[in-house]
Image: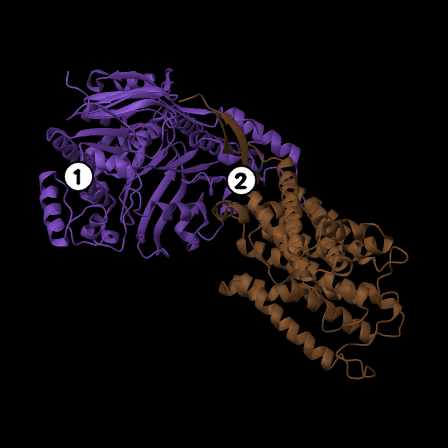
Amino acid sequence: MARLALEPRETNSIIAPIQVAALALVMTLIGGAVLFAIYGVSPLRGLHAVFVEPLLTTYGIGEVLLKMAPLLLIAQGLAIGFRAQVWNIGAEGQLILGAIAASALAIWFDGTGSPLLLPAMIVAGMLAGMAWAGIAAFLRTQFNANEILVTFMLTSVALQLLYYLVTGPMKDPMGFNFPQSISFGQSALFPTIIDGTRANASLYLGLVATAVAVIFVRYSFASYKLSVGGLAPGAAFYAGFSSKRAIWIALLVSGGAAGLAGVGEVAGPLGQLQRNISPGYGYAGIIVAVLGGLNPIGILFASAIMALVYVGGDFALLSVGVPDAVTGILQGILLISYLACSLLLTMRLRLVREAPV
Amino acid sequence: MADPILNISGVTKIYGRTVANDAVDFQVETGQIHAVLGENGAGKSTLMKVIYGVVKPDAGTVSWQGETVDIASPAEARRLGIGMVFQHFSLFETLTVTENISLAVEGSKAELTARIRSASERFGLEVEPDARVHALTVGERQRIEILRCILQEPKLIILDEPTSVLPPQGIAKLFETLKTLAAEGIAVVFISHKLDEIRALCDTATIMRGGRVVGVVNPAEETSKSLTQMMIGQEIAEFGTRAPATASREILRVEGLDHVPEDPYAPRLSGLELSLRSGEILGIAGVSGNGQGALMRVLAGEIPTPPDTVILQGEAIGATGPEARRRKGLHFIPEERLGRGAVPGHSLAENVGLTTFHSGLLSSGFLNLRKRRARAAETIEKMDVRCSGPDAAAQSLSGGNLQKFIVSREMALSPQVLIAEQPTWGVDVGAAAAIRQRLLDLRAQGVAVLIVSEELEELMEICDRIQVMFRGRLSPAVAAGQTDIDHIGLAMAGDFDELEATHG
């Protein structure tokens, strides 16, 4: 007689997170097939449209890279905080603030053509994202206000601020009262990196963030302290690591990264400040961070997969005629599958042969 | 010989690769007080779980009153007449004693109250039926658990390390109760690893090691040494003869320390005084929950106090944090190993950095991973920690081995003061002996050592001086050689005068 037994892993496996992510992906494909069958579309055709079609053309690949840039930035930042159990749920709001700050510079210095304009926008966007997240850090460290609620609610505040600005102070005076700013000049835009696509240099920011995160997580003392605080607050207390400092670092880093992502949107595909600047990148970034196992390299792959699902959803809308809600459903299946499988990160399955009783 | 009421033969239970019980035979007779003795991980708990229906054995038979039975659940066990008192109580703190018992025993409240009163009188289990549990001491709570068991009219009661939470006088009382129970024809299975208790109380002892029964003996005819040898299968090293503490200087001083804890049920610390000298071991005795935890946090620097209440080598450090205190040579070993002394999910290499990073494991904010790993390997080797190496996760180690790792880590930086909270609690005999020996070695090197322990014998054995903590107050220190367990025991119940008398 044989049965499967769960037992704890003795050492932290390097392969396990990859296995878990792969398993989650397979479960998502199965879930997707069922979903397409429900819509009356051949599952194979549907999956082909979502997961393969975008990769067949240069344009498709460019779109994937375009969507990957903000997801990568946001997820790398969030993962630093999540590892310390500091839950910044408001990357969407920090992204908006980053976009607003960068746009303010682009509008103010419009027409100067200064080569310093884009770098200045990048710095301003990052600082604005950090400041917005910093509010949550301040409230948490001073008054023990839950950062999940504060960051989440600040996102609503950020949206209202954005609506006010694009219909008021930052509205294009020649724009026929449309709620949007002027179109930015060339010096306020990221250059595209592949001809014939919209993929732009903001992706490099994400890749640099990834490289920094790899080094930070593996070698820095600050990251070690964050991880101790996250896994065992009692041990951090015993060692004498400051939890307030961990909260500040976690929120400032993730807020700054989300702010950068906001710059990438207004100085990238949008080219102006408008009411809709993000299709929920701030929330999808949470999924990417978790799916990547909070590991910088894992997040690199996870952001590519999530970007593919975003673009593939659009492609499926056109080629097989399913509603664009499919994107959200697939993202949800992916996250839930991952969470369900994540038990295997610390436990392993083993086939046990039992002596007959 | 009477037929055994419980007869277990050939029981085997395997968890993954661990054989928790290997063809275990175990017999208990009516009216017997039967000890089950063994180190942590010897298979005692698994065997008890089999008897109480929590775990189903992979092989073997259980027979009860001569009939083979399949005990599928604790409810089934209780129906057969098997009761169990766990080490960790399961009582609702907001309910009264009677209400708690009524959850397990049928009958109206008035009826139950009467039954509780008569049973508590008969078995010496004093407890007020209308009292709410949160206001009761640990000893009283244990009595409720035992009463709840007795009122279900069991024929066999299992007690899992019942004395570990009691002061010495409470233990004497519990023993009388157990003897009364046995005289009434109830079989008692008593789990412990305190040998003198077992020799004083039990008629028979079944000794387990590595999942097997290695002997069934009459403990009164054995010595503590012979029992220990059977338990651990080897001779434990005798402690080196101890030189008397030489003229030494004061290293750590606590003066007029008051502290009001956040937890309203925890005792306030008031007017604590202590003086710790180099080359001595000072013990703090007392039943846990009398403020020892808060005192430890204060000494370690986790709870800041006015600077001049804690003085380390002439320097007022009351407001200094744990990290800075470690740099000044004050190291602390906390009671909880997983989650405080070590990060459960981190490897041993990562855990070695928790308290020693300032000693060359760090350069300009970056970790030296190679050096940290080497340090972990040294730490493991120095205390003979059984594990798969520096990459083993802390949570994969047994309690005793993890404690050895933590002790080894805190000793590596040659501390001037070492403070240890329950250093051998829940640790097997071999590891406990090794840890005590290390503490004595430190003392010989002139380190000032402070130990908080509930185990009086441990304190009497290794300490030079002892202070007793009771409800947030600390008794004056007495030389360990000038007092005895009875006087310390009285002080643990709040009577400091007796202790001072012996000192004077």
Chain B rendered in what hue?
purple
Q: Label 1: how many residues lie within 10 Å, few (<14), some (14-19) or many (20+)?
A: many
Image location of residue B476, percent across then percent down? 27, 42
CA distance for labels 2 and 1: 42 Å
Chain A rendered in what hue?
brown
Camera-side residue: B8 or B286?
B8
Q: Is residue B86 visible?
A: no
Q: Establish whether labels 2 and 1 are both on one chain.
A: yes
Q: Tell which tag, 2 or 1, sits nearer the viewer.
A: 1
B211 horizontally vs A32: left or right: left
Image location of residue B192, percent across then percent down? 28, 29
Label 2 belongs to which residue? B345
Q: Residue at x 11, y 46 (%)?
A: B115
Q: Can residue B146 be seen in this view?
A: yes
The chain holding disc 1 is: B
Q: Please name the amino acid that badge 1 sits on.
A: Ile
Q: Relative to B47, does residue B419 appear above or below in the rendering?
A: below
Camera-side residue: B256 or A318?
A318
Which label was assigned to residue B150? 1
